[in-house]
Structures are given as C-alpha cells and as structure tokens.
Amino acid sequence: MRDTLDFLLNDWIGLGSLLQRPRFADHSPETFASVLDTCERIAREKYAPFNRLVDTEEPRFDGEKVILPQATHEAWKAYAESGMLAAAQDYEIGGMQLPYTVEAAANAFFAKAAVSIGTGMLTTGNANLLMKHGTEAQRKVFALAEFGGRWSGTMCLSEPQAGSSLSDVATRAVPDGSDFDADPLGPRYRLRGNKMWISAGEHELTENIIHLVLAKIPAPDGKAIPGTRGISLFIVPKKLVDAEGRLTGERNDVALAGLNHKCGWRGTTNTLLNFGEGKFRPGGQPGAVGYLVGQPGQGLRCMFHMMNEARIGVGLAATMLGYAGYEASLDYARQRPQGRSIRPEGKDPSKPQIPIIEHADVKRMLLAQKAYAEGALALELYCARLVDELHTGDDDSVLTSGLTAAREAGLLLEVLTPIAKSWPSEWCLEANSLAIQVLGGYGYTRDFPVEQYWRDNRLNMIHEGTHGIQALDLLGRKVVMDGGAGLKLLAARIGATIERAGPLAGLAAPAAQLAAALQKLGAATRAAWATGVPEEALANATPYLQAFGHMVLAWIWLDVALAAGKAGEPQRQGKLSALRYFFAYELPKIDAWLAVVVSREPVCREMQDGWF
Ligand SMILES: Cc1cc2nc3c(=O)[nH]c(=O)nc-3n(C[C@H](O)[C@H](O)[C@H](O)COP(=O)(O)OP(=O)(O)OC[C@H]3O[C@@H](n4cnc5c(N)ncnc54)[C@H](O)[C@@H]3O)c2cc1C
C-alpha cells in the first residue's frame, strides 16, 4: 500500500506543489515522507498487533469506569505523542502546519492497522471546530488541551429519536442563572437530554472528555424553535474546569446510561449519554453545565463546517479496511493450493494443486478489490488535496472557470464529498465481502482477519449521514445548487482527463466510454428533475448516487492511468489492469442505475405499507 500511496501523492496529485505555499514553506518532500514513516511505524507497532484483541475484549463498564484494553491506552499515548492531533495547526500552538493531504494520508495507516482503536479523529475535529468558532478562552482552554492529547473530544449530535433528522433534537439548554452571560468560558447554560451513539463518549484514556453537544435554547415562550434554526452548540466537559483550564474537582452532570454492543468497530466505546438527569449535581444543582459556541441557532452551521474533512475521514477509513482485506486475501490466494488448471495440463490429478491465485475467478475477485480500494484511495487523496486548495489556494488570480482556485475547490468538494463518503463505504465493504470469499470457509472464521474487516466496515454506510441521506444530498442539493455550478466544474475536469487520454493508445477506448458515461449522467440529472417534483426525482436518489460514484471512479482511474508510466513496471501493469477491469466490469453497471432515474421509476414511492 505504501508504494501506491507514494505514487498517488507524488506522481499523481503532485503533493510537492504545496511546498510553494507560504504556509508549508518550511516543509520539504523529506518532512512529508518522515511524517508518513513515523505513522506507518506507530501503526505497525502499536495498532496492528492489537486489532483482534480490541475486537474480542469489548469495552465494559464496571459500574464506575469504562475499561478498555491496555493496548488502547498505549496506542492513544503513542498517537498523541506523535503530534498528529495538531498536525494541521499553526506552529505557535504546537502544530506542524502540515497540509491536510499529508495528515489524511498519514492517518490512513492507523485505519488499516486497527480502525477501531482510533486516532482521535473526533478529538481533532472537535478542537478544529473550536479553533474556528470558539472564543479565545474556549480555544485556549479546550482546543489546546485536545491538540495536546491531555483531553479528548466527542461530537454529540444524535439522539434516540433524532438520527438522520437532526431538526428533531430534543435536548434543551436554558441559561444558568442571572450571570450566565458573564462566564469567562462563554455563555453558560444547563443542558438536559439524551444523546445516542456517542463514540468515545466515556473512557479513561484522557483526564477529561470534551463533549460538543447540539441542543435547543427555548424561545421566550418556553417552546423550542422548530427545525434546524433552533439548534445551538455547546461545550460540555465531563469534568468541570476553571477559566485557566484546571480541573475543579467537580463532575459535570453527564452520565453514562449504557454502552452499545456493536457488530464491529468494537475498540471504540459507543455510548448512550444522559445530560442533566441529576446523577451529578454541579454547583449543587442537576443539569449539565455547557458553554455556548458561536451564536444561538448556529449550531448546525458550526458543525457542518467540519463536514468535508469528517466525511473524507470516514471514506478513508472505509478505503483502508478495503485495502486491508485486499492485502490479506491476496496473500492467502498466493499460498492456498486448491484445484488444477482448466487447461489440458490440469487434467492430471497426480500433479500438485495450484495456488488459487491462478484461477481466473479468484483473480476477478482480487482485481475488483484492487480497483475498489486503490481507486477509493486516489479519490480520497484527490478530495483531501481540494481541502488544501480551499484553505490555502490562491485567492487573487482567477482560473478559466472564472473562479478563484479556492472557490473552485470549494464547489468541487460540495459535489464530491457525498461520493468520498459513500462510495468507499459501499464498494470497499463489497471488497471485504470478496476478501472473505477468496478465503472460502476460512474467511468465514475468526481465525482470519477478513470477517472483522467486513464487520468494522459495515458501520461506514450508516454514520456521518447514511447512504440514503448522502444520495438525497447529492441529487437534491449538490448537483443543482448554484445552477449546477459544481457539476459543471466536475464535468470540465473529467473532460480535461478525457482529452488527455483520448489520443493515447490503450486509453482511447476508456476515454470514449467515460465521455459517454458523463453524457448519460448529465442527461439523467436533467431527466430526474424534468418535472421539478422532488418526490419524483429523489425516489431514485440512491441509484443516482451509485451511478455518479462509479462515473467519478472511472474518471479517477483514467486519470491515474495517465500517470501510471511513472510507477515502475509491475505497478504500472497493475494500475492499467485495474483500469481495464473497472471499465469492463463496473462502469457498465451505471446503465441499469440510471435507467430508473431517467424514467423516474415510481415503484418504490408508490409501494404501500400494507402491500409488503
Ligand atoms: C457505531 C456508531 C457510531 C456513531 N457515532 C456517533 C457520534 O459519535 N456522534 C453522533 O452524534 N452520532 C453518532 N452515530 C449516529 C449516526 O450518525 C446515526 O446512526 C445515523 O445518523 C443514522 O441515524 P439513526 O441510526 O437514527 O437511523 P435513522 O435516521 O432512523 O435511519 C434509518 C434508515 O432510514 C433512512 N432514512 C432516514 N431518514 C430518511 C429520509 N428522510 N429519507 C430517506 N431515508 C431516510 C436512513 O437512510 C436509514 O437507512 C453513530 C452511529 C453508530 C452506529
């Protein structure tokens, strides 16, 4: 995987060009490589050996504390000491000023080694959000302690009755006393409500846990403002702290109501948390003390600020699980003798069996995994590079699109983020299923790692916006927003790749096939919205998402193939074969997916409850 990662970073997306940006001027190809080397080593030594252990030794609650394996404590310590929690932050606050692309690539090693031990993605996201939307005191007290690894963070959005529909959150926040506005840590409220599915919501890995909680501040008539407009964001520390960030010794009113027992991803605690139920009484009263972040009613807007990176992070985790299964099954297929050649020489049963990698059908399963996992890795790095463009791109000069580089990157990310999150979640999960298939019966046992990869990966289509919600976002919002500006930009980039590949022997046919796919997708987008009735257009949003994703991945593969000459011989052949596989076996699937979009097939929306 490292050779592919290096090839994609250096020879494909041109990571080196970022070194010309003032923010990254102190870096060099060597410093980037050394960050990758360090993370690869920590992942190998502190994460990979314990992947099975954290799966079997699930977190447990002893009535007072949540117990995690010692290995998890050591992995967290090593990760925090590496400085990666503050990878992208300014030097002045102890950061490394690394591009997001390098941070994401380095974190990929941990996802592959033991995804559920985790790297503090939530902690970094939580602290990044505070750097953007918090007050100076909130940044200093909470964010800095998180970047240093002394405290960790959570994101508390979901509730038992409000998962996809966050406008229905029922947690309430009321001002805490007449001086609530005078607290140095921000306007102080008392929160009451239940938060469900909170990852890393309770543990002893860090001295304190900083929850970022969505809650509604009732209007003066005591009623909650309906919809997302009424949602605000609060910092709710597990243990209370003073204005200097010292623990006061008082426990906040946040109580663990229970641990969820998951299909996979078992190394991370997943919790139901009760806020303000009165188990603890800070200041002698029940109610969880929380400090407002940003303005009232702006909670979701603050959260969405982090969305691109959070979703790329989920897509990358799904990708690396796909990669892990691919490598494990490839290794197995090379060693497992079973059956004989289908050619005449295989007719002689006295001859030894051949390794299963010699069978075309096993190669099909391995090629599919390679096409999914390496393609997804390329997609995630491409999107990560867009995040860097968004943050550090040239804001003065205008590109041929008439937009600045940063604006162009922002629009492209709007359209590509649902794909970056959902495509690896679906297809690298399929890769894991194929990995199990390659191992046959052994793959179905816990003696081999592939079943765990599948279980771990099954989460990714569910969290950070389910598959169905991503599809609605893509077809309902992203491809039509700003008059379809994001889609047009994407089409222009795809067109540029087609133009480069068209004249080249071996790439002309896929280039023509991709041009046709792009044209079909544009026509389907228009057909979906031809009547302007959302119910008709969006009933088939998921097949649209699938077709869109496959078209994007076909583009990514064609673009990667253009750089394959720099990869060295066996790698080059591997990339070109994965491209051929993708265009022969995968891209044609879009016709079936788009057919129902174009006809606005009504069977799903017309089906009635009683007919099932
Ligand atoms: C292991 C794990 C970790 C998590 N970590 C966190 C965390 O740290 N913080 C946090 O806040 N949350 C977290 N979540 C919650 C996660 O984000 C939610 O599970 C997710 O948003 C879906 O909500 P739900 O489970 O209530 O399902 P629902 O929203 O009830 O969805 C059920 C099904 O209905 C579909 N559906 C729902 N609404 C619509 C609609 N309008 N149109 C079409 N289809 C629809 C969905 O696509 C889905 O298939 C985690 C979940 C899990 C399982």
Image (cartoon, grey):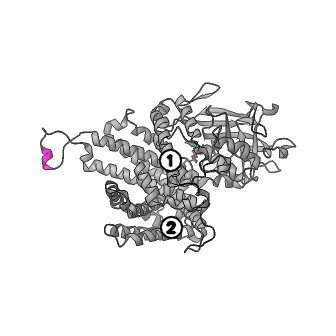
- Can residue 26 be seen by looking at this rendering? yes
Residue beneath the point at 50% across and 51% down: 30
344 inside magenta stretch: yes
- Horizontally, is 561 left or right of 333 in the view? right
Q: Which mark is residue 34?
A: 1
Q: Which mark is residue 485?
A: none
- Horizontally, is 426 left or right of 358 in the view? right
Q: Identity of the amino acid at label 1?
A: Ser
Which quarter of the figure has residue 141? top right
- Horizontally, is 331 left or right of 273 in the view? left
3D distance between C-alphas at marks 2 and 1: 33 Å
Which quarter of the figure has residue 578? bottom left
Q: Identity of the amino acid at label 2?
A: Leu
Residue beneath the point at 46% across and 43% down: 112
Which residue is at the front of the view, 397 or 534?
397
Residue beneath the point at 32% across and 36% down: 441
Mark 2 against mark 1, which lies toward the viewer?
1
Which residue is at the front of the view, 220 or 92?
92
| Percent x, y of residue 365 | 33, 49
Region rendered in magenta:
340-347
Pointer 2 or 1: first along the chain:
1
Q: Which residue is mark 2?
A: 490
**Element on which disc 2 rests:** helix
- Can residue 437 be seen by looking at this rendering? no
Q: Is mark 1 within 8 Å of ligand 1?
A: no
| Percent x, y of residue 331 | 33, 42
